[in-house]
């Protein structure tokens, strides 16, 4: 099969490699679409993966290609985390907090290939009305949902999302769907804010043109937002997310940090005096037994039209142009939202 194989930092090659063979409890999936996550860019260009060679890509969907209880050809999405099933967190069903996990696309080969092998328990059939491209975006949409659920958002509350990348715009959509009275979207890129407005978010803040903390205060009657979500992963947006939170507000740390964050004493004092909650979030909930979870919620919401994923797609590349897709995301010389590798 063809695959985009990372041999070393910056050394990504399109090669013919052996098609993987599924073992007991595993299924061969013909990959149809795989999203490039923001975390894939440093894996390829600066940090590397856990070993070389590696096939990256963890936001994937395709069709069943080997015998299982799912008919061959069934469209599926794939939960990429490979949990151990033995630790305390796994026994609780909190697979994202597994103490000894694997991961498709970083610790083992992932979706920038024609085929991938995954445990049957990690596969979910796509419901009618959900395309394979949307199936490939289930993972980031579930991460976004998990983030807003961490804040225990109540209907009628206000939400400020700092960072209008694909996941930030998914967070905004979830906040609206969950009954937020006011959703404010902040970013430094006019094109990203324009996309937010196309999705129906009229309260947008250009953080290059004004102080987002002051503007969020103005838009909330001086109170600040009940929930702020840091979705950019940069120190400035983290401090802004803290500064923009209302008394008893919740600050959700979602973006992967690009550098150290130093909090001034005055801001720490505000955290204490306003009794803010700082909430970490990572990954999403998934049930191997079919119970309600973030992934099933995403699929149902996309099928119902509650959450719009297709408008977030800015670029599509074939598998043999995976490096070009990565380069577009790295260079940011043009507007970029969600980049998909389709095969």
Image (cartoon, grey):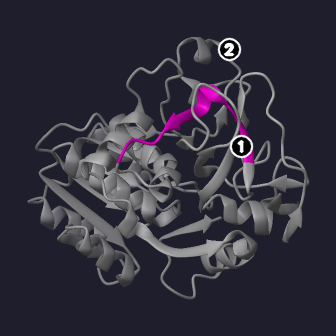
Q: Give above or below for 330 relative to 136.
A: below
Quadrant (top left/top right/bottom left/bottom right) for the C terminus: bottom right
Bounds of the magenta span? 116-128
Return the mark for residue 87: 2
* Quarter where residue 211 is shown: bottom left
Residue beneath label 1, please? Answer: 104
Quadrant (top left/top right/bottom left/bottom right) for the N terminus: bottom right
Residue at point 90%, 51% (across, down): 18
Mark 2 is surrounded, within 10 Å at the Cα level, by few (under 14), some (14 to 19) or many (20 or more) other residues, namely: some
Residue 63, image x, y percentages: 60, 46
Mark 1 is surrounded, within 10 Å at the Cα level, by few (under 14), some (14 to 19) or many (20 or more) other residues, namely: many
Residue 88, image x, y percentages: 62, 12
Q: Secondary structure at mark 2?
A: loop
Alpha carbon of mark 1 to alpha carbon of mark 2: how far?
20 Å
Q: Is residue 212 left or right of residue 99?
A: left
Query: Between residues 258 and 6, which one lies in front from this camera angle?
Result: 6
Residue at point 31%, 47% (across, down): 303
Residue 48, image x, y percentages: 82, 58
Query: Between residues 53 and 116, which one lies in front from this camera angle?
Result: 116
Residue 36, image x, y percentages: 61, 63
Can residue 254 be spotted in the picture?
A: no
* Quarter where residue 196 is shown: bottom left
Q: Give above or below for 176 relative to 194.
A: above
Q: Secondary structure at mark 1?
A: loop
Residue 166 inside the magenta-drawn segment: no
Residue at point 59%, 11% (across, down): 91
Q: Earlier in the sequence, mark 1 or mark 2?
A: 2
Can residue 130 be spotted in the picture?
A: yes
Residue 120 inside the magenta-drawn segment: yes
Query: Between residues 277 and 14, which one lies in front from this camera angle?
Result: 14
Q: Is residue 324 left or right of residue 151?
A: right
């Amino acid at each position: 099969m063809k695959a985009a194989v990372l041999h070393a930092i910056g050394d990504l090659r399109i090669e013919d490699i052996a098609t993987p063979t599924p073992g007991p409890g595993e299924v061969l999936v013909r990959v149809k679409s795989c999203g490039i996550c923001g975390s894939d860019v440093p894996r390829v260009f600066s940090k590397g993966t856990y070993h070389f060679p590696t096939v990256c890509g963890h936001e994937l969907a395709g069709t069943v290609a080997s015998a299982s209880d799912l008919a061959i050809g069934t469209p599926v999405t794939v939960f990429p985390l490979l949990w151990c099933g033995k630790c305390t967190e796994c026994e609780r069903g909190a697979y994202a907090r597994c103490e000894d996990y694997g991961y498709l696309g970083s610790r083992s080969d992932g979706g920038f290939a024609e085929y991938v092998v995954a445990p049957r328990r990690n596969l979910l059939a796509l419901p009618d009305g959900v395309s394979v491209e949307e199936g490939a975006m289930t993972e980031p949409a579930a991460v976004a949902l998990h983030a807003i659920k961490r804040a225990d958002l109540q209907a009628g509350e206000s939400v400020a999302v700092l960072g209008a990348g694909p996941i930030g715009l998914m967070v905004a959509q979830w906040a609206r769907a969950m009954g937020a009275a006011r959703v404010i979207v902040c970013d430094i890129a006019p094109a990203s804010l324009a996309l937010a407005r196309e999705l129906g978010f009229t309260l947008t803040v250009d953080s290059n043109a004004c102080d987002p903390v002051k503007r969020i205060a103005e838009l909330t009657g001086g109170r600040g937002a009940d929930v702020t979500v840091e979705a950019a992963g940069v120190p400035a947006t983290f401090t802004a997310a803290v500064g923009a939170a209302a008394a008893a507000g919740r600050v959700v740390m979602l973006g992967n940090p690009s550098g150290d964050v130093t909090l001034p004493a005055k801001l720490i004092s505000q955290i204490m005096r306003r009794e803010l909650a700082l909430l970490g979030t990572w990954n999403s909930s998934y049930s191997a037994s079919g119970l309600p979870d973030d992934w099933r919620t995403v699929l149902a919401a996309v099928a119902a039209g509650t959450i719009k994923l297709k408008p977030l797609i800015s670029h599509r590349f074939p598998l043999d142009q995976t490096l070009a897709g990565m380069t577009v995301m790295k260079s940011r010389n043009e507007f970029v939202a969600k980049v998909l590798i389709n095969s």
